[in-house]
Image (tube, helix red, strand yellow):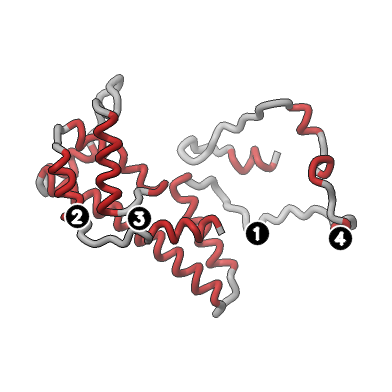
């Protein structure tokens, strides 16, 4: 019930429609039947700690920021953990800004300062696919990532922009050149180090 309440949301952009799959009779079993118990916890009682609960659902693309923010918030003041968590949070925010700025710059290099943002954000009429050539989309995403770093979960929001670049008939050489100009020197391990922190 708690999972359902925390997952469902009045706002469909942030919540999920909670479903239960499989053998629903298993949900009546207690977990220790499968995992065993820790004798040290035999006299413990369950406490529903609301203090660290997120008050509303979080967009999936912001999950890493929430994770890093909580690591920072929970770490003791002045500790190495606090400093490291702040560094991870700052790097995640910087990575997002870098992706946003790089995609915008690629658009301006390909289509011009005025037309670039318009092309990148255009939405095709209902019934049309996101992109006419899916191989183009895959290869242009790889090209961008080669020069500008991993799109990561957050960067998936720019998939429409890359699709629009393909739909506009931009050639591979142009995409390579624009990506290289937009990101002349990006360390390839920046986001991979953040992902390691997210999994820790």
Label 2: how many Cα within 10 Å (few below 14, some 14–19, many 20+):
many
Q: Earlier in the sequence, mark 3 or mark 2?
A: 3
| Number of marks | 4
User: CA–CA distance between discs 4 and 3?
Assistant: 44 Å
The spot of residue 182 in percent (x, y) is: 19, 55
Q: Is residue 113 left or right of residue 93?
A: left
The spot of residue 155 in percent (x, y) is: 35, 47
Q: Earlier in the sequence, mark 1 or mark 4?
A: 4
Which image quarter: residue 76?
A: bottom right
Residue 51 image label? 1
Label 3: how many Cα within 10 Å (few below 14, some 14–19, many 20+):
some
User: CA–CA distance between discs 1 and 4?
Assistant: 25 Å
- For this orientation, the residue located farthest to the bottom is 78
Please give the residue where the numbered disc 2 appears in the rendered image. Answer: 182
Q: Pick whichever, 85 or 195, lies toward us.
A: 195
Q: Nearer the viewer, mark 4 or mark 3?
A: 4
The spot of residue 73 in percent (x, y) is: 55, 67
Residue 40 image label? 4
| Residue at the image point whose x is 82% and y is 44% from the top | 32
Relative vertical location of residue 124 with respect to residue 53 in this rendering, above or below: above
Q: Earlier in the sequence, mark 1 or mark 2?
A: 1
User: CA–CA distance between discs 3 and 2?
Assistant: 15 Å
Relative vertical location of residue 167 with respect to residue 145 in this rendering, above or below: above
């Amino acid at each position: 019930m708690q999972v359902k309440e925390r997952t469902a949301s009045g706002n469909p952009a942030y919540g999920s429609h909670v479903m239960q799959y499989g053998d629903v009779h298993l949900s009546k079993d207690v977990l220790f039947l499968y995992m065993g118990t820790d004798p040290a916890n035999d006299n413990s009682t369950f406490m529903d700690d609301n203090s660290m609960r997120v008050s509303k659902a979080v967009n999936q693309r912001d999950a890493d920021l929430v994770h890093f923010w909580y690591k920072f918030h929970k770490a003791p003041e002045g500790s190495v953990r606090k400093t490291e968590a702040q560094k991870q949070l700052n790097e995640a925010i910087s990575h997002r800004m870098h992706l946003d700025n790089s995609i915008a710059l690629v658009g301006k290099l390909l289509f011009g300062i005025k037309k670039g943002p318009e092309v990148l954000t255009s939405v095709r009429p209902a019934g049309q696919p996101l992109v006419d050539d899916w191989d183009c989309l895959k290869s242009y995403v790889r090209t961008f990532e080669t020069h500008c770093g991993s799109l990561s979960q957050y960067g998936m929001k720019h998939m429409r922009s890359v699709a629009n670049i393909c739909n506009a008939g931009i050639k591979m050489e142009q995409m390579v050149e624009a990506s290289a100009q937009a990101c002349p020197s990006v360390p390839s391990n920046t986001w991979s180090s953040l992902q390691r922190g997210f999994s820790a």
